[in-house]
């Protein structure tokens, strides 16, 4: 007797699952997408026009998904706002939204498109996953009607959510995540009343998902890693780069390392507002990344990762972040400390006037120690050691402790902290540490040209960020970016901007 088609399909799928179970690695893909934006509109467009724009973006995403599958990828992440862009009010985004059901309903939109219709976007995404036997991660908009029986129901009678969806290789909806930490201009969306910690199991590890600005906060990002023990984080984003500490490739790779997880970041590509930088990051460094301010092309990245990074030999040791710094004397008492702003935060700096040395700079509870040796002390470049301990209040509120070795924009100390993309000074050694009051410290090392220093630095278990054998390229910054979540304000308040 011949097996029926569904049985055959199940058998093939089961075999694939078993093969994946047998291997300890998987292939991940992320696609940086130059999203086709709608024309800025005052009135909502028709549902057909909205779908036409979304289809033109999905045409491009479909090409990337096919290509990723051909290269053997098991999962692909596409960016936040990657299907309709970002120029919206509450009203003008409405025709782009679909009602996205809770995944417990067990729905394959590709084979059962009318069950929660109209849902043409979910149907197409589901078919792309199913046709190519690949997990597809996308970001779309969810709408949920509400009424006066709910006192917080918005006046227009519906909640609108910035939403990530995941379809498995059969096309089934397996995850839905409503973004909790909306960025300030996202007035078209509501945030869910409670943060959602969304995970799903695969044959290649446990996955968690959150979106863009969420990465700066405790919920749900830290909860997914520390409490729910995910192996890999999926991260659709529309990230505007801010040097020196919050450039996408730099901060996202640092978060993967600081938290000890794989991290799949897919950014939109739109250079006029500094959106570029996607990557496939493991806890010990980037496996692949893309940063390109020179053209408007999308880019597919594909790389292999450990399914369970915590079990791998390369997994970095646990770090006690203040252990070294609390146990040494101040390296120096400086009479030349000065202040300066980095992205609206008032740092205390000390200039590195000598080609090598041991320096300390302090602010409030944080003292930062640096031992360094430059390959050559250049007349035309100034580096500082800087410390900041305080609440950041512009474009979101979050409490920071930061130690940084940083190149100034020019030789004028007034420019220390201004964004700078290139440098000429290499270091033979650096070792940076700080008296952090948190376990959440993200180690960043950025080279000239906004390049990552993958494999060229390490964090010792006593909290020192050290170069391994000197820097192969000139250094823009080596930074320990610490977050004190318990000093943050309660959730809805911290979106307020006080310039
Ligand atoms: C999936 O495959 C079917 C049948 O081959 C085809 O009709 C459909 O257009 C495909 N859809 C997508 C989104 O790839
Ligand atoms: C609106 O309110 C009624 C009760 O007043 C309730 O039965 C209904 O489910 C509500 N609809 C929505 C969409 O919340
Ligand atoms: C910095 O400190 C180290 C160890 O404490 C010492 O070996 C080195 O000579 C010092 N460097 C300078 C330039 O003072
Ligand atoms: C912050 O969030 C609250 C609650 O949703 C909202 O009322 C307020 O307008 C927001 N503030 C800004 C600056 O977006």
Image (cartoon, rainbow, N blue to C red):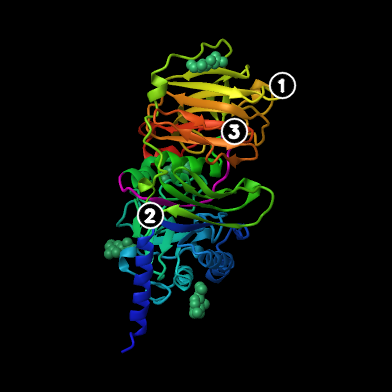
Q: Tell me where residue 84 sits by quadrant.
A: bottom right
- Which numbered disc, 2 or 3, marks the residue that appears first in the sequence? 2
Instruction: Tell whether 328 sits left or right of 148.
Output: right
- Which numbered disc, 2 or 1, marks the residue that appears first in the sequence? 2
| Residue 343 appears in view | no
Instruction: Tell whether 217 sits left or right of 407.
Output: left
- Which numbered disc, 3 or 1, marks the residue that appears first in the sequence? 1
State yes or no: Cβ of the residue under disc 1 lies below 8 Å from any atom of ligand 3.
no
Q: Tell me where residue 22 sits by quadrant.
A: bottom left
State yes or no: Cβ of the residue under disc 2 lies below 8 Å from any atom of ligand 1.
no
Mark drawn on residue 274: none
The residue drawn where x is 29% and y is 57% is 149
Q: Where 188 falls versus 50 (above or below)?
A: above
The picture places residue 39, in percent across and down from the top left corner, at 63, 60
Q: Which residues are magenta?
A: 227-244
The picture places residue 231, in percent across and down from the top left corner, at 37, 50
Specify few, some or many for label 1: CA neighbours under 10 Å numbering under 14, 14-19, or 20 or more: few
Assign a secondary structure to mark 3. loop
The picture places residue 480, in percent across and down from the top left corner, at 48, 31
If the image is split into quadrants, where does the C terminus sit? top right
Specify few, some or many for label 2: CA neighbours under 10 Å numbering under 14, 14-19, or 20 or more: many
Q: Which residue is mark 1?
A: 379
In terms of depth relative to the viewer, which is nearer, 79 or 27?
A: 27
Q: Nearer the viewer, mark 2 or mark 3?
A: 3
Assign a secondary structure to mark 2. strand
The picture places residue 490, in percent across and down from the top left corner, at 36, 37
> What secondary structure is the magenta-colored segment mainly?
loop
In terms of depth relative to the viewer, which is nearer, 367 or 213?
A: 367
Give the Cα distance between marks 2 and 3.
Answer: 34 Å
Q: Which residue is mark 2?
A: 207
């Amino acid at each position: 007797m011949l097996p029926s088609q569904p049985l055959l399909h199940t058998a093939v799928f089961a075999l694939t699952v078993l093969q994946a179970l047998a291997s300890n690695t998987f292939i991940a893909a992320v696609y940086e997408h130059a999203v086709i934006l709608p024309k800025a509109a005052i009135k909502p467009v028709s549902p057909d026009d909205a779908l036409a724009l979304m289809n033109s973006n999905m045409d491009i995403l479909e090409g990337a998904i096919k290509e990723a599958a051909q290269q053997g990828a098991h999962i692909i992440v596409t960016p936040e706002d990657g299907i309709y862009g970002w120029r919206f009010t509450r009203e003008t985004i409405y025709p782009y939204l679909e009602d996205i059901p809770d995944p417990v309903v067990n729905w394959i939109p590709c084979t059962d498109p009318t069950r929660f219709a109209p849902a043409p976007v979910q149907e197409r995404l589901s078919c792309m996953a199913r046709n190519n036997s690949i997990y597809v991660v996308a970001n779309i908009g969810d709408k949920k009607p509400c009424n006066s029986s709910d006192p917080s129901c918005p006046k227009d009678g519906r909640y609108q959510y910035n939403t990530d969806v995941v379809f498995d290789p059969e096309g089934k909806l397996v995850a839905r995540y409503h973004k909790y930490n909306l960025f300030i201009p996202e007035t078209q969306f509501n945030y869910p009343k409670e943060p959602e910690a969304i995970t799903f199991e695969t044959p290649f590890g446990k996955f968690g998902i959150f979106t863009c600005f969420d990465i700066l906060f405790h919920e749900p990002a830290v909860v997914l890693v520390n409490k729910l023990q995910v192996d890999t984080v999926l991260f659709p984003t529309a990230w505007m780069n801010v040097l020196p500490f919050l450039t996408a490739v730099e901060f996202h790779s640092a978060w993967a390392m600081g938290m000890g997880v794989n991290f799949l970041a897919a950014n939109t590509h739109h250079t006029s507002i500094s959106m570029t930088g996607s990557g496939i990051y493991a806890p010990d460094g980037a496996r692949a990344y893309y940063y390109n301010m020179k053209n408007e092309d999308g880019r597919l990245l594909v790389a292999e990762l450990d399914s369970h990074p915590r079990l791998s030999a390369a997994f970095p040791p646990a770090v006690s972040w203040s252990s070294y710094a609390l146990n040494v004397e101040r390296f120096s008492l400086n009479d030349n400390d000065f202040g300066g702003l980095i992205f609206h935060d008032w740092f205390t700096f000390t200039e590195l006037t000598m080609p090598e040395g041991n320096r300390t700079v302090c602010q409030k509870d944080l003292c930062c120690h640096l031992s360094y040796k430059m390959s050559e002390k250049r007349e035309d470049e100034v580096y500082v050691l800087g410390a900041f301990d305080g609440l950041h209040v512009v474009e979101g509120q979050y409490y920071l402790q930061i130690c940084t070795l940083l190149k100034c924009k020019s030789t004028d100390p007034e420019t220390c902290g201004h964004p700078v993309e290139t440098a000429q000074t290499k270091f033979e050694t650096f070792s940076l540490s700080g008296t952090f009051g948190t376990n959440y410290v993200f180690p960043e090392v950025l080279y000239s040209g906004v390049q990552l220093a993958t494999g060229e630095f390490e964090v010792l278990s006593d909290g020192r960020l050290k170069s391994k054998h000197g820097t192969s390229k000139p250094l823009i910054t080596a930074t320990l970016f610490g977050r004190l979540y318990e000093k943050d304000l309660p959730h809805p308040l911290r979106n307020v901007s006080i310039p």
